[in-house]
Amino acid sequence: MRGLGITGGAGIAYGAMSTLGLAPAAADTGGRTFRPPRRSDLLGAAQGDHSVVILGGGPAGLCAAYELRKAGYTVTLLEARSRPGGRVWSVRGGTEETDLNGETQTCTFSDGHYYNLGATRIPQGHITLDYCRELGVEIQAFGNQNANTVVNYRGDQPLADTSITYRAAKADTYGYISELLKKATDRGALDDVLTQDDKDALSEFLVDFGDLSSDGRYVGSSRRGYESEPGAGLNFGGDTTPYSMHDVIRGGIGRNVSFEFGYDQAMLMFTPVGGMDRIYHAFADELGGDVIEYGAEVRSMKNVPDGVTVEYVRGGEQRSVTADYCICTIPPNLVPRLAHNLPGEVIAALGAARPSSSGKLGIEYSRRWWEEDERIFGGASHTNRDISQIMFPYDHFGGDRGVVVAYYSSGGSQRAFESLTHKQRLAKALAEGSEIHGEKYTRDIASSFSGSWRRTKYSESAWASWKGAAGHGGEAIPEYELLLDPVDRIYFAGDHLSNAIAWQHGAFTSARDVVTALHERVAASA
């Protein structure tokens, strides 16, 4: 199986070009797993110009265009929207969008305020940060978790409908787990797997991990916070009382603790200053106006002798372009709607990438109540209500206003919002949010804006979920593997063809794999 969404492959291509006499025998990659093709790899060695038409101006399309231009290819990028970034977009004052429900919203956020309706965070290991550095996009820390945000879960279990700080939920959960495991160790329940030295070391760890008392019990901890902050002199602060072991276990208040353990969710996380779309405007600026055609709605994509012809509509005018190769980054759920001559098994493979639901609603408040009243500076509150989570702004700290993401929901929770008008979405978000943060959640509202990826034209999906696959890493279904190979001169790229589905990193790694494969093919045919 060819590289499943990994960043490697350039070394193989470079070696092939060296064998053919099209590149030097040695390459200095500087320790990177990907070295973009250079103009000198082909120019002067391969005869003629080499052209590529790219469908879609999202992360994969812009990345492919950017890397191909470095190697001297003639690139035409067709984007149906009037902006770069595809599903990655930031909403700020003046943003206007008409969804597939027929409703038009115009954002009226104050200057400098925004939220990312698309991607919002970048893990440290993602090559997205490499492109930020290369393109000069300034980044800042993103508060993925915050000890002062809360969890609040509906149900008939203990502690239902109770807002509990994340720090308290974490302290009580870790504390009681540690107490139980220490008791089991002390009573010999683990003697068949642990030596005495092992048990002593484990007990020492558990006392620290759970902040247990000298007799091995969890009786509360300053880790869960104070009723009042400690001050000067004899003001030792007011301790808080832990919930009972039974309530903590049955209530499931620690169900979100593992979120921050995820490889791609662990702090620190980052985000561009001013909005995630800064990355894609930077790509567009580098490519220049002669490469990208905005407002170009693709209608047809067909292999023809010695190339690919794409027909599209721009400004009401029918147009076409023929290039040596095509890289299609249009969402897989939309490709079958084009006029095409793709084989039936390819169309079936595209259909195995099932569209998913996700969306957000941003509320601009004229008072930063989350900071003033609850000492929350970034991070998110979590719930099992349809709003799923409330994300607090990571910028303008200490200011007079800010934009809160009142819900970021997916799957069935988001489908509860999709068919609603924006006014109805807002009312539902406020009703559920006030059950978590109180009536102040419904006051001091200046403006709002919502979006659903399934109801957004040219997307109609948040990300792909592969039919029959348990996840998107470590194993591939046949349909996935089929789309990794070109159909004659048409290549497919996007985060759905990576091990980082729903991440910009996935789109970039897929684009780089395709650029490498296409470049190797051109070199081999020279």
Image (cartoon, rainbow, N blue to C red):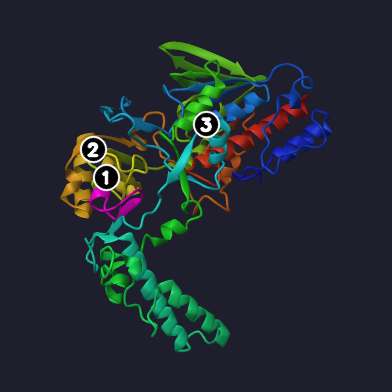
Residue under circle 1? 416
Q: How packed is label 1: few (under 14 Cα within 10 Å), some, or many (20 or more)?
A: some
- Indicate the quadrant where residue 242 lies: bottom left
Task: Find out whether the residues at labels 3 and 2 contact each other: C-beta distance under 8 Å.
Answer: no
Q: Secondary structure at mark 2?
A: loop
Q: Residue at x 41, y 76 (%)?
A: 178
Q: Which residue is mark 2?
A: 420
Residue 152 at x, y = what percent?
Answer: 26, 58
Residue 381 point in image, percent of width and height: 31, 53
Q: CA distance from mark 1 to mark 2?
A: 8 Å
Residue 330 in the image: above or below residue 380: above
Task: Please say if 261 is above or below 133.
Answer: below
Q: In this view of the protein, which residue sits in the foreground, 100 or 81?
A: 81
Observer able to see residue 199: yes
Q: Which residues are magenta?
A: 370-386
For badge 3, the amino acid type reads Thr
Q: Please name whichever residue, 306 or 294, is drawn nearer the observer in this view of the structure.
A: 294
| Quarter of image, res 160 | bottom left
Cβ atoms at labels 1 and 2 below 8 Å apart: yes
Is the residue 487 above or below the residue 141 in the image?
above
